[in-house]
Amino acid sequence: MTMDNLPESEKAYLVGVELTGENALDIEESLKELAMLAETAGARVAGISLQKRSRPDAATFIGRGKVEEIKAAIQDLQANLVICDRELSPAQLRNLENSLDVKVIDRTQLILDIFARRARTREGKLQVELAQLNYILPRLTGIGIQLSRLGGGIGTRGPGETKLEVDRRKIRKRIADLRHEIDQVKRHRNLLRSGRKKVPFPLVALVGYTNAGKSTLLNTLTGADVLVEDKLFATLDPTTRRVVLPDNQTILLTDTVGFIGNLPHHLVAAFRATLEEVIEADLLLHVADICHPNIEAQVKSVEKVLESLEAIAKPTLMVYNKMDRRDRECRHNLPADREAVFISAKTGENINELLKKIAVILSGGKIIKTFFVPYDKSSILPLIHENARILSQKHLADGVEVHVEIQQLWAARIAAKMRQGDGSQVSQKLIRD
């Protein structure tokens, strides 16, 4: 398949491999997604080639005959970039570039390039650079990268070191520096998080496959002005806003980076600081595109990342989005095996139902607790009265004892607030079951 009259820019030729036992439809969807990624990165797709194999060729990813076929195709199409739909080894990358005589990248490198373009905050840029360097390090011999911008000068070259060894040493040093900077960012985020807990609002995180409509939903619920585009990874950096639920409870709603199938492990590791918003959340809203033909695979991809973050067991509400397109574009059956809300973030359809559902989930799990509030912490009493049903209250010599019915979430948050800055023995009796 080809596209004629493409502008003189980067023309990409996509290459996929369908291995024995794999689902042909999944591979086809993966190639379609690769085409969207290429267009998001600014390339135009000139052609696509798919080869069926029992396993990838160790030297060239695809068979040698296929290499010659693709070489002829990219010459006819005047393509100047080949993108492979799987991660290539350093040897495969080097051999393909030598054989095809054009730049060759893989799916991981393409996603890294998009992330580098999309990152806006210092934290996002640090995490992207870390992921890129972790990807580059084992591939230096394959891509011959020049790294003089990373540092160097007098005193950096050891006796007898080759340029390759110097480059590797520079990358390792830069990786160590980046990890240190990201640790500092992580500590800063922890301070912000502890500050939020002083005025404890439940944290709800939006998660989902990229382009599922998370940013549109955040804008609809909060009136935020987050960038919304019909592109993969339109937004990268997290955004947090307040939302007031129908029961007058205030929550913090956070939009997170979109996930994708075969998300490079470099990115999951590098973006762990950002994704800690998911780890710390009290509730996850898993947003899925109801009109996507491969919706179940997308849902599973998101769950796989949540599992790697050890967040798969968190309370989660499925939110099937883009219901405004169901009549003209959605031809498959709606999922029926999950408790979910079906909405259109674009038109506002069922948004009130979603807010009510969030309120019900966050108000569940009520328990009976007795709080002991010392008089020097009496400012906490209004917080208890606002978020609990008072069963009894006694004024004692050194504080107030309040017997309440309260959500487990709020019990934990109020206890944490009372313990802040209190190392005395009084703190040991702040809560009694």
Image: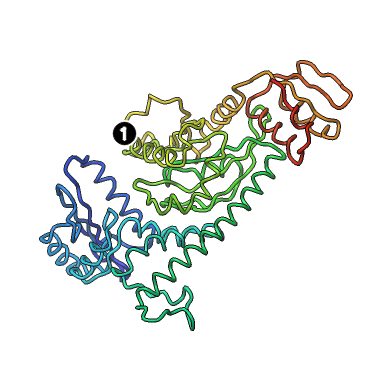
Residue 5 occupies which quadrant of the picture? Answer: bottom left
Q: Nearer the viewer, residue 161 or 69?
A: 161
Quarter of the image containing the N terminus?
bottom left
- The picture places residue 350, in percent across and down from the top left corner, at 52, 30
Question: Where is 190 relative to 168, above or below?
Answer: above
Q: Which residue ends up furthest to the top in the rendered image?
A: 391
Q: Which residue ends up furthest to the right in the rendered image?
A: 397
Q: Nearer the viewer, residue 148 or 354?
A: 148
Residue 375 occupies which quadrant of the picture? Answer: top right
Question: Where is 219 relative to 369, above or below?
Answer: below
Task: Check disc 1 and report its element: helix, strand or loop.
Answer: loop
Residue 294 occupies which quadrant of the picture? Answer: top left
Reading the image, the residue beneath label 1 is: 331
Q: Residue at x 55, y 57 (%)?
A: 182
- The picture places residue 158, in percent across and down from the top left corner, at 42, 79
- The picture places residue 207, in percent across and down from the top left corner, at 48, 41
Q: Which residue ends up furthest to the left in the rendered image?
A: 65
Number of on-image labels: 1
Q: Which residue ends up furthest to the bottom in the rendered image?
A: 154
Amino acid type, residue under disc 1 in the picture:
Arg
Q: Nearer the viewer, residue 381 or 15?
A: 381
Q: Residues within 10 Å of mark 1 (few under 14, many from 20)?
A: few
Question: Where is 205 relative to 93, above or below?
Answer: above
Position of residue 334 in the picture relative to residue 420 (left or right): left
Quarter of the image containing the C terminus?
top right
Q: Residue at x 40, y 75 (%)?
A: 166
Q: Residue at x 17, y 57 (%)?
A: 62
- The picture places residue 244, in percent across and down from the top left corner, at 65, 35
Position of residue 390 in the picture relative to residue 60 (left or right): right
